[in-house]
């Protein structure tokens, strides 16, 4: 993600990478774990809105390759 793009497919791919990585992050630091636990429900809610946005644009998720 080192460049800007207007390509909806590229944007969706980048969003899914961020979303998945944020969901699988783990930490042995209790403070970091607490922040991650607090952010995950909000991140899931944001994902619903982002996916609705991509649905409106007609963007389909890429098949696993």
Image (spheres, rainbow, N blue to C red):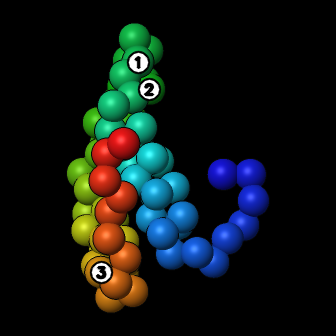
Residue 31 image position (x, y, % from top left): 43, 24
Q: Which residue is mark 3?
A: 55
Q: Earlier in the sequence, mark 3 or mark 2?
A: 2
**Which residue lies at the image location 26% right of the left edge and 56% below the top edge?**
44
Cα distance, mark 3 to mark 2? 33 Å
Q: Earlier in the sequence, mark 1 or mark 2?
A: 1
Residue 36 image position (x, y, % from top left): 37, 35
Examine the rendering and report whether any part of residue 65 can be seen: yes
Viewer-side residue, 43 vs 60: 60
Residue 3 image position (x, y, % from top left): 75, 59
**Which residue lies at the image location 36% right of the left edge and 58% below the top edge?**
62
Q: Which residue is mark 1?
A: 27
Residue 39 image position (x, y, % from top left): 35, 46
Examine the rendering and report whether any part of residue 43 can be seen: no
- Residue most toward the right? 3
Q: Check the image and report above or below for 46 versus 25.
A: below
Q: Quadrant of the C terminus?
A: top left
Mark 3 or 2: in front is 3
């Amino acid at each position: 993600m080192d460049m800007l793009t207007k390509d909806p497919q590229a944007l969706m791919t980048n969003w899914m990478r961020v979303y998945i990585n944020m969901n699988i992050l783990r930490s042995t630091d209790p403070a970091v774990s607490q922040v991650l636990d607090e952010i995950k429900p909000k991140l899931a809610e944001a994902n619903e809105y982002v996916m609705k946005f991509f649905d409106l644009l007609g963007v389909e998720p890429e098949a696993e390759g």
